[in-house]
Image (cartoon, rainbow, N blue to C red):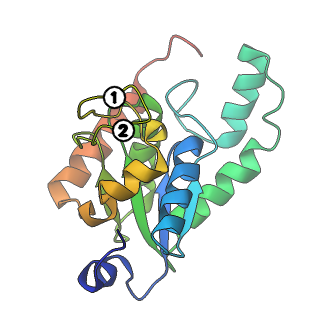
Amino acid sequence: MPPTSSDVSMIEPQKPVVHVVFNMSAAGSLRQALRSLKLHQTVIGLPDDLSFGPIDPPTADLRGQWVEDTLGYDRWQDLPQSVDLFWSRATGRDVTPVAWVCRRSAEEFAGFLEFVSRIGDHPFRVVDITQVEFAPRPDRSESETWRAGSFGSVPSDSIAKARLLDSQTVLTGQELRTYRDLWRRLRRKPSRHT
């Protein structure tokens, strides 16, 4: 069901909306959901997973080199450029970011914490699906309501049916401080993998 006119005014401010997602699979599902709702808004996905490897600092060059050296995966040569582009678009002052997160997913939560750390005082909205109960899907094994372990596991039709766009919130100053303090502590923690 498309949003009502009051819903649209909430999600279509003066600056263009950019949906910021910390899981590439979730970015694809969200794009499909927005198309089904006839909304022409941009979705960008973080092409990195900050839940592992060096995160202090979480620079793409350092992380790409670590992935090559430690994991032997040499296809991350383009990582620095694509990650830098993501952060530039996600925290740009010419857009209204809407960050999507499931705090049950280490990948998504770590990306979200880095986003909150980088965004500064620029206003943004959040769709936190951590406690959302999704309706059963007859074409799947779920026969009861279910909660997602990751936004990446939520199908596009469930995003639309749950009216997740209507659940956008703005974090309080205390919530922002709590998230930023948590990310600072996590970044300082010595990693067993570095």
Looking at the image, which residue sits at the far front?
A: 138
* Quarter of the figure with residue 31: bottom right
Identity of the residue drawn at 49% across and 58% down: 20
For the residue marked with disc 1, what is the amino acid? Glu
- Whether pointer 2 and pointer 1 mark residues with C-beta atoms closer than 8 Å, the reply is yes
Q: Which mark is residue 93?
A: none
Identity of the residue drawn at 84% across and 26% down: 74
**Residue beneath disc 1:** 142
Q: Is residue 90 left or right of residue 47?
A: left
**Residue beneath disc 2:** 137
Q: Is residue 101 left or right of residue 36?
A: left
Q: 160 and 57: which one is in front?
A: 160
For the residue marked with disc 2, what is the amino acid? Arg
Q: Secondary structure at mark 1?
A: loop
Q: Position of residue 69 (x, y in %)?
A: 77, 18
Crowding at mark 2 (Cα within 10 Å: few <14, some 14-19, many 20+)? some
The quadrant of the image that shows the N terminus is bottom left
* Quarter of the figure with residue 146: top left
Q: CA distance from mark 2 to mark 1?
A: 6 Å
Q: Position of residue 175 (x, y in %)?
A: 19, 51
Q: Secondary structure at mark 2?
A: loop
159 in relation to 52, above or below: below
Identity of the residue drawn at 74% across and 42% down: 79
189 in relation to 154, above or below: above
Q: 26 and 33: which one is in front?
A: 33
118 in relation to 57, above or below: below
